[in-house]
Image (cartoon, rainbow, N blue to C red):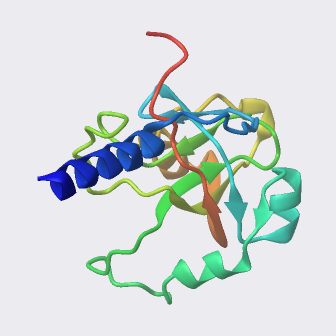
Amino acid sequence: MILKGVITIVFACLVSACSTVSQQATISLPLLHGWHEGKEVLYITTDVSDQAVAKAKNANYAPRLRDAVPHYPKPPQVKTVLERVYAFPNQEQAWSVFASVPEPLGYKSQDTHYSPLWLMYVVAWKDPSKATELRSEEAILTAEDQGLVTIERTDIVLNCPVIPFSLVD
């Protein structure tokens, strides 16, 4: 009986030690804005496989992320961990466009297609004076079909998790 009481006290001490809130260090990361299906999404960029892009985004240079890029041509049935992110390097558009985001955001997501790893596709307007803001993958592909933009697949992989909250409730 005494042994059981001692074990209970030791267990209670261990559990309370684990639940003690200690002062945690915090950091600040730039919160970036993007588009998905016409809606604003928020994300951070932590790692990039290209050193120049990593420097521009103040992210970690992580060349091994390129290991996630499949060999091309890739059959459509071959699935990878990479999703498409569309970037506009000529600054006609400030926000990137994401092909997918978790739906709903956060731990309740049921979306099996979302991944925080993105393969960058570069979108360039053929005539920059005709540039409009493209807010979805569908809008980008439509602009390509109309001959307004070119889309180029790169081998640049970015780790850009979508943040599971919004600025507006």
Q: How many marks?
A: 0
Name the residue: 43% across, 9% down: 169
Name the residue: 74% across, 34% down: 94
Q: Quadrant of residue 103?
A: top left
Name the residue: 18% across, 52% down: 2
- Pick out the residue farthest to the front: 2
- In the image, residue 29 lies at what x, y percent? 74, 38
- In the image, residue 145 lies at what x, y percent? 48, 51
29 vs 157: above or below: above
15 vs 40: above or below: below
Q: Quick check: can you spot residue 151?
A: no
- In the image, residue 20 lies at what x, y percent? 50, 36
**Viewer-closest of 160 and 16:** 16
- 20 displayed left or right of 26: left
Q: Quick check: can you spot residue 75?
A: yes
Name the residue: 73% across, 48% down: 126
- In the image, residue 69 lies at what x, y percent? 54, 80
- 154 displayed left or right of 135: right
97 vs 10: above or below: above
Q: Quadrant of residue 33?
A: top right
- Pick out the residue farthest to the top: 169
